[in-house]
Image (cartoon, rainbow, N blue to C red):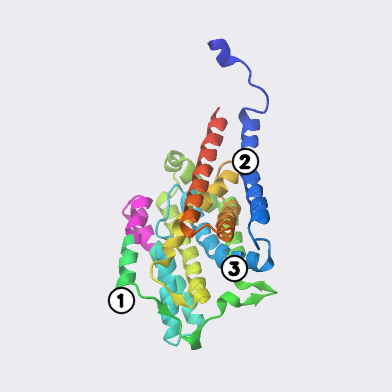
Amino acid sequence: MSDSLSAPQPAGLTGLSGRALLRLVMPTLFAAVLLFFALKAPGFLTVGNLSSLLLNNFVLLAIVAIGMTYAIAAGGIDLSVGTALDFSALTFVLLLNAGFGLYVAIPGGLLAGSLAGLFNAGLIAGLRISPFLATLGTLFIGSSVQKLLSEGGQPIYLEAQVRSGLATERMLGVPLPLLLVALLALVYGVVLARGRLGREIIVLGSQPLVARYSGLAQRRIAALVFIASAFASALAGILLPATVNAYAPMSGNAFLMNAIGAVFIGATLSLHNRVNVPGTLLGVLFLNVTANGLLLIGWNFFWQQVATGVLILSVLLFSFASRRLGAG
């Protein structure tokens, strides 16, 4: 038995080669999904459909998922991203309807959404409550507050004369929402990959004992992480009512699970199985392409959710297999 255990394994099936081979699974799957929908989904490759996919589906989820990347990189999770988005959207709509311009409504919305992150920071860094429980509490409190402020959950529409037009603005020929995604991804991505704070976040998430004994300011890092996550969601909260011309209570919660899934898909695409902003954007694109293609071939919303769940579960299994190969 000892001989069989110590026998050399075929090259390319273990260690680095095995992990490299496994890394090809997700890109290959992505390419296969694109090819399948290009052949089977009517109108999938049309300019109108791809433009709608990017502007109506990709942008908002990408912004929320970029913020979620920080929370997961730090070893936690932010269940209250929807609350931050909704508070921002509500404040933005109320300020515009009250006669204030964009120069007041935009910073007001961003501040209101960021307050959810500040509240989380107080619970996590101040009271040392786990991120899961702290953000879950913020989610429940935020949902109740929204119902109280909106007469039980009634939408609040932007008045016709104050519609912002942010969703249709262009700069240098590029839609403003896409530019905002690019700018946010650049800032958050560079900080996480190259900045000192990013290195501290990664250490805190991947090696918490090392972070503790090396003297890292864990509570400060956690506070900054959840404020950054809420700020990203608040930015999405500005764009959502600018797109649909209304605030719908609790609508931000619809982005939660897909944001988490996108981050883990992005980690699986990483060479070091580590969450990262570019990978998260690819994860968002993967999920949106899948949902869009299934819609075009006639699957209803509930089956789309089943497919998304299966996809995320598959990603987690690939991630687990990759770690096992790395450990071996």
In front of the other: 26 or 5: 26
Identify the amino acid type marked 2: Val
Looking at marks 1 and 2 on the same chain, the residue that comes earlier in the sequence is marked by 2
In front of the other: 106 or 297: 297
Q: Position of residue 246 (x, y in %)?
A: 45, 77
Identify the amino acid type marked 1: Glu
Q: Which residue is mark 3?
A: 55
287 drawn magenta: no
Q: Which residues are magenta?
A: 118-139
Q: Secondary structure at mark 2?
A: helix
C-alpha distance separating marks 2 and 3: 28 Å
Q: Position of residue 295 (x, y in %)?
A: 55, 60
Q: Are marks 2 and 3 in contact (CB under 8 Å)?
A: no
Q: Which residue is mark 1?
A: 151
State left or right for residue 123 relative to residue 316: left
Q: Which residue is mark 2?
A: 25
State left or right for residue 94 relative to residue 288: left
- In this view of the protein, can residue 224 be seen by the observer? no
* Residue at screen point 41% across, 72% down: 248
- In this view of the protein, can residue 296 be seen by the observer? yes
C-alpha distance separating marks 1 and 2: 49 Å
* Residue at screen point 39% across, 76% down: 155
